[in-house]
Image (tube, rainbow, N blue to C red):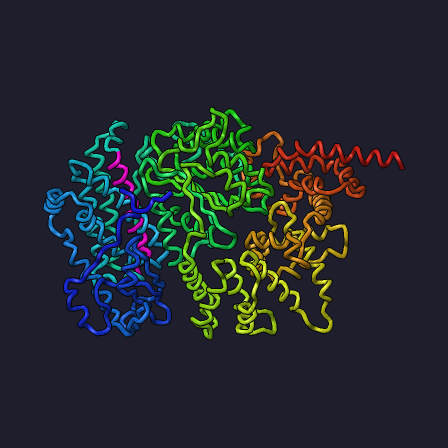
Amino acid sequence: MNHANQPGDSRSVPPPDIETPNETNAAERPGRPRGKICRFLGKVTNGVIKKMSRSSLKDSRSRDPVTPVVDRKDVSSIPNIEVQDVSPGAKQGTDPQSALRDVNEAAKGMNLLSGPVASGISAAQNAPADACTFEDTYLRPLKIFDAVIGKLANVHPYAKMALGVLSCASQIILAQANRDEAILNLYMKLGQVYGFMTQDDTLHQILSMSTILGQVSQQTLECAHFIMDYSEKKNFWKRLGKNVISETDDTIQRYNNVLDALMQNFRDQVARDVAIYTHRTSKDSGHASGLTPIHTSTGEILDLSGMAYSEAAGLDTRKRCLPGTRMDILSDIMGWINDSRDDVPCVLWLSGPAGTGKSAIAHTIASSFIGVGGLGSCYCFDRNTDDRHKKVFSTIARDLADRHPEMRRALAGAVQNANALKTTADVVQQWQKLLIEPLGKLSESPVGPVVIIIDALDESGKAAETRSDLLRILAGKLRDPTITHITKLPKNFRIIVTSRPLHDIEAALAGAQHIRRMSMDDISSATTERDIHAYISNELEEPSDFGDTQFAALAKKADGLFEWARLACKSIKAPPPGLSPFESFDAVVSRNPAERENLLYDMYEFILTEIMRIDKSPHSTSRQKQLTRFRSVMGQILGASEPLPLESLNAMRHHFPDKSERYEVQVMVKHMGSLLSGTTNSSTPIRPLHVSFRDFLTDQSHSGEFFIDVSKVQRDLAFASLRVMEHGLSFNICDLKSSYLPNSEDPGLLDRVEKYIPPHLSYACRFWPVHVQATHFDPDLAKEIKSLFEHERLFFWLEVLSLINALSGAVTTLPLIAKWLKVSTLLLSVR
């Protein structure tokens, strides 16, 4: 479905045609490209700002302004910077101050409203109702600002989103017969603010004052959402029984006060605290836009304790795209999110092969919206965590409740007399009872777009069946007429789904008109190679011997795979002992896998082969012993039901039945930092950094001698879990003062649970049945189980499950235990 250049779409707004007042003389000035004003596109690295040529600007006309890449370095050195043009054939040595003057001249040429407010408004109202005129007058300064601050990560996302929302709002205002004076006042204030920041004597402060600029852009986005909401439904306050004129004036005055305070901070070059003003048009608009207290002023208790929530499934800012990369697709997605037309699809499915950067895009979008209250939830599946598919909408609902007071109240009401709803694994019931129905009770939807991200859908469990209901919900294909269709979500809700294009996902989402499909394969190879080149040059700034020739070779070799580029850079920066960075570089680029789909697998084989050659001393262990330990350690990591940190892996391994396996896992994982997370922090869960590494290891046809048979480690994990409980469980483990007090009323209990129930004991109590079930019957293992159930440890185990809110798992365990004990009894009777 093509959404480009449709009326009302923020992406259809062209970048500004910024001309200098005396453009005919531009060619006479030496060292300056003729024509349109340049944008800052390069990055300030070792005293270099790269300058975009006229041809580059011309190519960007069909999309949002291309954002420059500017490092956060002390701007005091700018006068001595050598300016280079990055376009082919561009001249070098341009005076950097001329670039600043270009922006200043363009700003002066915009006829900014510097006179009295009334005259400015009158001029705008009497002007022809032309979109270009309106946007030139009010939005041009923000567009120039957006073009200057692309690399300032805490500023640009807000500016980009504000620009998109304001562009949409301007289309609506143009269609109104009588433009609202108060709204034009606010537009004018924004024009003045950004006009001030693009003047010659303030532009040089942009890098050093990036924190204040971030606050200005964030407040601008709040203003933009207010204008959009006001413009779409002017009577939205009347329905709340409020005075429209006084409320509008009061709100705009508050916005103006904050913007004035921030501008004064900018002038004074100080970073005083200024609270961003957020207006919420709901019955609870008196509340702050953030958290709501559990106990309300009316005495009601909004209790969500015990409700299923998937830990560590949220936003990971470390996964964001490198600033300045993936700009086209990010701008496209931002435009879709901010598009308020009724016929805009509410779901976007971003698909692509493993390693192409889908998750990076998702986490970049999430990061952009979290600072302005627009992120409803970011839910990331992980194949290493078995039960995340059972908590998807309960977690999303709780995230929304944290961001919206009325949602918290509605959600608490939904579960108040239905405790089973808190932990139900039925995602259809979660969807209807925990999300749709509570949202339907809100008097007003949250202002501005609300973004829900579901990342790595293809990793939801170990079989396609685990995501079948979720796919039917997303596709709107549930047969039950009592279940609300996804298109009935509030119209400002947007759901982004990322996954590999697996057959079951393709089939389920095919033909759905409310789903917009995007593919990483649609991004041009030249654009992807350019972005990977930027990533590699950033990663390999050291060693300094590497240059553009090496960067270009690696970028071409990556063939569109960011994950391959990451692995290559890691291998070069930290080569195996005996190899220099250049020798590692040569080894990486000289490999020639037969097919593109095996490019990542080829890199994994290369890295693991080098790891096995690390210890070459005469007294080192044999390669076979290294491989045996590698398979054992990786089998434990991949076979665990949830990722465990280094300390817990060691604690479990010390109870393996085979004493020869009782060594520290560091002997292997310390060399695998490029492949695993948590290798340098004993409390961080260890897991594959990319799902493709797990796929490689568990596919014997590709991994060969590195193949991991996860089923073989289940017996070891079952034994280890039972023995961890044998040594770790005790009477009243968390020192409860009274057995008559509910856990929720015991002060300090959460701290004591964390202190006395370490992660490996918590893991063993929750997952020993899972490992037993995955193991063929074993008499020795049956004795361990029998010992547990014939000892008072059984009650200690149940107490721990209660303390960690996992008691429901004991119910499903009982049939399994009965089966094992019955078989064990029969075998003993036969003997």
- Front residue of 104 and 172: 172
Query: Could one spot residue 99 in this view of the protein?
Result: yes
- Front residue of 524 and 615: 524
Q: Residue at x 16, y 55 (%)?
A: 110
In the current view of this chain or complex, which residue is farthest to the right? 831
- Front residue of 200 and 761: 200
Position in image of residue 139 (x %, y %) = 22, 50
Q: Does 456 sit above or below residue 591?
A: above
Query: Could one spot residue 162 in this view of the protein?
Result: no
Magenta region, main secondary structure: helix
Q: Does 500 sit above or below residue 401?
A: below
Q: Tell me, yes or no, whether the highlighted magenta stretch contains residue 383.
A: no
Give the quarter of the image for residue 738: top right
In the current view of this chain or complex, which residue is farthest to the front? 594
Number of marks present in the image shown: 0
Q: Tell me, yes or no, whether the highlighted magenta stretch contains residue 212.
A: yes
Position in image of residue 126 (x %, y %) = 10, 43
Q: Residue at x 17, y 45 (%)?
A: 130
Q: Which residues are magenta?
A: 208-232
Would residue 786 be found to the left or right of residue 349 on screen?
Answer: right
Position in image of residue 812 (x %, y %) = 66, 33
Position in image of residue 751 (x %, y %) = 56, 43
Query: Which quadrant of the figure contains the C terminus?
Result: top right
